[in-house]
Amino acid sequence: MHKIMQLHVITDFFLQQTYSHADLTQMAFEGGATHVQFRQKTGSLRARYRACREARDVASRYDGLFIVNDRVDLALAVNADGVHVGQGDLPARVVREIIGPDRILGVTATTTDAAVQAERDGADYVGFGPVFQTTSKSNPASVKGLDGLLQAARAVRIPVIAIAGITAAKIPLLLEHGASGCAVLSAVCVAPHPDRATRACADQLKLDVKHPDGL
């Protein structure tokens, strides 16, 4: 069984262009993230591969996990620790067959039924939401709220990671409503100092800062 980390930082180069995916990966781990997810929806596949490879190289220096959003091919190409897929991507059971038993599989669920199905299909964790309103997606699902989060967390045995609209101040409420951790994008990536923003989230989760191997 994989140890699923608590603080997922999702990298971004759409809402901001100040920092590269590699920059954000480094600052996320320096700030205490336990899990970085590479997310790039646009651009050529080759350009996305280069950015993903650079971020993966940074992540390899830290005691954390590196996950690729949506793209199973990119995850395998850069030897990522796993992949996270949504309801519009390849079915979770198919992804599990492709990546094998040793890589981490995360699945986005917007309903309790979807969370239960993700567990049946071999997911290691569920990213459940949107718990709150979010601006990082152009067409998000309806907000589920804290009650929806609690219902999903009670329905599955795998960790439930709260997603969408997450800020450091909201983390205690998420934990009270069954979340094992949270995933943040805007709260970190568009902050003036992503490392400090990550640290604020890590503090709420009582996480230790990770340091590069050998440093």
Image (cartoon, rainbow, N blue to C red):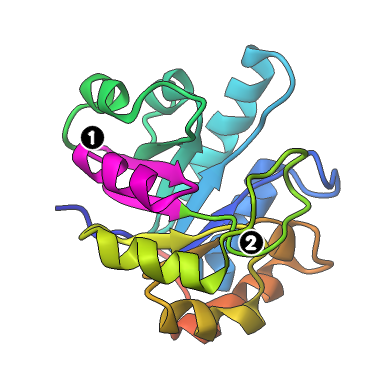
Kind of residue at badge 1: Asp
Please give the residue where the numbered disc 1 appears in the rendered image: 121
Q: CA distance from mark 1 to mark 2?
A: 33 Å
Q: Which residue is mark 2?
A: 27
- Is residue 124 placed above or below 41 in the rendered structure? below
With 30 as the anchor, is 108 left or right in this view?
left
Quadrant for the C terminus, please: bottom left
Q: Position of residue 113 (x, y in %)?
A: 35, 46
Q: Which residues are magenta?
A: 103-127
Residue 172 circle label: none
In the rendered image, residue 152, in percent from the top left (x then y), is placed at: 37, 61
Q: Is residue 121 above or below residue 213?
A: above
For marks 1 and 2 on the same chain, the one whose residue lies earlier in the sequence: 2
Residue 212 shows in the view = no
Q: Position of residue 98 (x, y in %)?
A: 26, 19
| Marker count (numbered) | 2
Label 2: few (<14), some or many (≥20) within 10 Å?
Answer: many
Does the segment drawn in magenta span residue 14? no
- Camera-nearest label, 1 or 2: 1
Residue 29 left/right relative to 19: left
Three-letter code for the amino acid on which mark 2 is drawn: Met
Residue 104 image point, x, y percent: 29, 42
Q: Is residue 122 magenta?
A: yes
- 25 versus 175 height, above or below: above
The residue located at (50%, 48%) in the rendering is 110
For the residue pair 215 and 57, the one nearer the viewer reads as: 57
> Which residue is at the front of the view, 128 or 167?
128
**Which residue is depicted at the point 54% across and 55% down?**
129
Quadrant in the picture for residue 35: bottom left
Dot 1 surroundings within 10 Å: few (below 14), some, or many (20 or more)? some
* Residue at disc 1, secondary structure: loop
